[in-house]
Image (spheres, grey):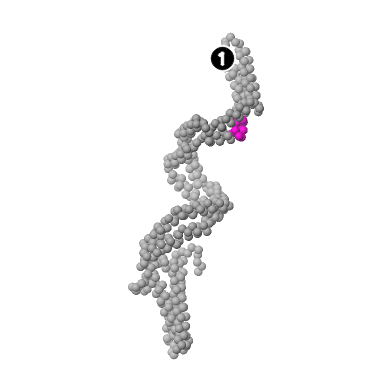
Amino acid sequence: MKEPELPTEAWQRAVLDRHRRFATACLFLAALIYFATHFVDQPGFWILLIRAGAEAGLIGGIADWFAVTALFRRPLGLPIPHTAILPRNKARLGDGLGRFVARNFLAPEVVEGRMRDSEPALRLAVWLQDEANAGLLADRCLALAPDVLQAFDDAEVRGFYAETFHGQLGRLDLLPLAERVLRLVVEGGHHQRLFDRSVRIAREMLLQNRETVYRRVEERSSWWIPRRFDRRLAESIIQGVEEWLGEVAASDHPARWELDRAAGDLIDRLPESQQLRGRLDAFRDEMLASPELQQVLESIWQDLRRGLLQEAEADDGRLRQALVASIRQFGETLEADPAARERLDERLIRLLREIVLPFRDRIGGFIAAVVRDWDGETLADRLEVAVGRDLQFIRINGTLVGALVGVVLFLLTRALF
C-alpha cells in the first residue's frame, strides 16, 4: 500500500491494523510450531532445534507485545504497574512536547535558517505564475470583495478618506510645488506658447466685437461730432490695436524678452516669498474646507464601490481575467528581480522574528495545554495511530530475533555440553 502525500487517519488506521495482524500472526505461528513439536515422539536434533527457536520466538514476541501495548493501555485490561504509560503521564508528556517544540523547532536560528534556505519569495513568485494558482487566488479575492465592500459603512469611509486627504494635503507646502511647476513651464517654453495663444485670442475677440467698439465710441463722443467721424475713429482704434497685437506676436518682439525676464525673476524670488506662501496656504485650506470637495470624495467612493461590485458580480469574467493576468505578471516580475525577492525574504524573516518567535514559549505552553486536556484514551489512540505501525515492527522483530537467538543458544548448548 503506497503512502499518500497527506495520509488520512483512516489510511493510518488501516495500515496499523494490517501490521498488527501480521505481528500477531508471527506470534501465533511461533506458538503453533512450539506446541506442535511436543506431539512428536522421541524428537531428534532438528525437531529440538525448531522447538528451541519457536520457544524463544514466542517469548520474545510476547515480551515485545507487552512492551508495545503497555505504552498505550493496560495489557488484557489487567492493573499491572507501569503500564498505560502515555495516558497516565499525559501532563508530563504535554509539557515535554511543548518544551521540545519551543526549544528545538522554534529556536530563532533554526527558524530563520530554514526560512532563508527555502527562499519563500522565489517560491511565491513561481507559485503565482501558475495559471491555476493565480485563478484560485483571483476567485478568492472576488468572492470576498462584495462582503468586504458591503461591510464598510459609507459615513466611516467618507470620514476616513476626508481625514486622510485633509491630513496629507494639510501638511503639503505648495510653494516648492508652484516653483517647480513654473520652472518646468518656463524651461519647456510653454509660457511663450501661452503668450501666443493669448495674443491670438485677443485679436479674435477684437474682430468679433467690432460693433461693440463702434457703439462704445459713439456713446462717449460729444453730441456735436458727426457719427461718421466716430465710426472712423473706432475703426482707427481697432486697426491700431490689431496692428500692435500683430507686432507683439512676432518672435523677436521685446515683450517676449520682458516675459522671459519677469518669469525668471519670479522663479528666483518664489522660495523666499512668504506672502505668496501665505496665499497658497490660505487657498489650500479654503479648498480642503469646501463642501464641493467633500461631495467629490463621496462621489469617488460611491462610484468606486459600485463599479467594483458590478465587475465582481459580472458574468463576463473580465475582472477575473485582468486580476489573474496581474497576479501572474507580479509573479514574473518578482522572479526576475533578485533584489525585490531579497527584500521580501528579509521582511518575512523580520515578521517571523517579531511576531512568532517571541511567543514560542506560549506556543509550547499551548501545545502542553492541548495535550493535557485530551482524554487519556484519546491521547493513546491518536499516538498509536501516528506511530503504532512502526511499533508493530518491534513485535515482529522480537519474534524473529527471539527465534534466532533460541536457535543459536540451542546450538551452543549442544556443542558445549
Query: Which residue is identified by label 1?
Result: 220
Comparing 361 with 53, the one in front is: 361
Callout 1 secondary element: helix
Q: Answer with the quarter of the image where residue 376 lies.
A: bottom left
Tell me if residue 88 comes above or below residue 132 in the rendering: below
Q: Which residues are magenta?
A: 185-193
Q: Residue at x 39, y 61 (%)?
A: 368
Q: Residue at x 39, y 59 (%)?
A: 365
Comparing 304 with 351, the one in front is: 351
Q: Residue at x 57, y 10 (%)?
A: 223
Residue projecting furthest to the left: 79
Which amino acid lies under the numbered mark 1 shown in the image of this protein?
A: Arg
* Residue 189 drawn in magenta: yes
Indicate the position of residue 232 as horizontal and vertical percent values: 63, 15
Instruction: Name the magenta segment's main secondary structure.
Output: helix
Comparing 406 with 379, the one in front is: 406
Q: Residue at x 53, y 48 (%)?
A: 323
* Residue 375 drawn in magenta: no
Res 32 seen here: no
| On-image quarter of the C terminus | bottom left
Indicate the position of residue 290 as horizontal and vertical percent values: 46, 33
Indicate the position of residue 249 as horizontal and vertical percent values: 64, 26
Residue projecting furthest to the top: 224
Indicate the position of residue 335 as horizontal and vertical percent values: 57, 53
Q: Answer with the quarter of the image where residue 56 lies.
A: bottom left
Left or right: residue 352 versus residue 256 is left
